[in-house]
Image (tube, grey):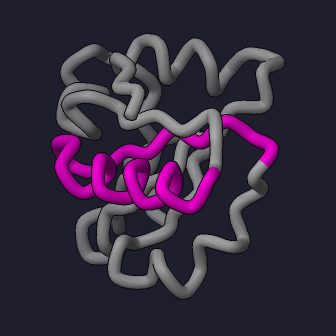
Amino acid sequence: MQTISVQEAYRLATSDSGAVIVDVRELGESEGSAIPGAIALPLTRFLKDFPTLQAKRQLLFICASGGRSSMAAEYMESQGHQGVANVAGGVLAWEDAGLPFEEGKGK
C-alpha cells in the first residue's frame, strides 16, 4: 500500500489529477472540522458505503493519525482498486503542516 505525506495529498487533491481525500474519522471526531473537499465516510460505515466511491479516482484515505485510514486503503486494494493511498500522520499532521482546514464545517 502506498503511503503519502499530507503535503502530497494536498497537492494531488488540489490538482487536476482527480484525486479525492476520503476522511474515515467517525462523525463525533469530524464534527466541527473538515478538510476542504474531502468525502466523509466513517470507518464504521465503510464496508456498507465504500461502493459509492468512484473507483476511477485516486483515493487518499485520512483519519486522525493514520491507523484507520491505512485499514481502509488496504481494504480497497484487496478489492482490486488501484490508485489508493494512506495519508501518513492523518489530520493531526495535516493541521501541524498548516494546510487548509475548515473549522465548524464538519460533514
Q: Could you say where residue 23 lies in the image, as x and y percent from the top left?
A: 44, 54
What span is in magenta? 56-80
Q: Quadrant of residue 6?
A: top left
Instruction: Give the vertical position of 6 relative to 84 (above or below).
Output: above
Q: Say which residue appears at 24% left-offset and 57% top-offset.
A: 68
Q: Say which residue appears at 78% left-offset and 21% top-offset.
A: 17
As drawn, is 71 to the left or to the right of 18?
left
Instruction: Give the vertical position of 66 relative to 43 (above or below).
Output: above
Number of callouts? 0
Q: Could you say where residue 99 lies in the image, as x and y percent from the top left?
A: 40, 20
As drawn, is 50 to the left or to the right of 70?
right
Q: Quadrant of the N terminus?
A: top left
As drawn, is 33 to the left or to the right of 46?
left
As drawn, is 63 to the left or to the right of 16?
left
Q: Say which residue appears at 59% left-offset and 42% top-offset.
A: 59
Q: Quadrant of residue 79?
A: bottom right
Instruction: Give the vertical position of 9 relative to 21 (above or below).
Output: above
Nearest to the observer: residue 102 or residue 68: 68
Nearest to the observer: residue 14 or residue 49: 49
Q: Could you say where residue 81 lies in the image, as x and y percent from the top left?
A: 64, 49
Q: Quadrant of residue 24?
A: bottom left
Nearest to the observer: residue 66 or residue 25: 66
Q: Is residue 42 magenta?
A: no
Nearest to the observer: residue 105 or residue 99: 99
Q: Say which residue appears at 34% left-offset and 17% top-offset.
A: 5
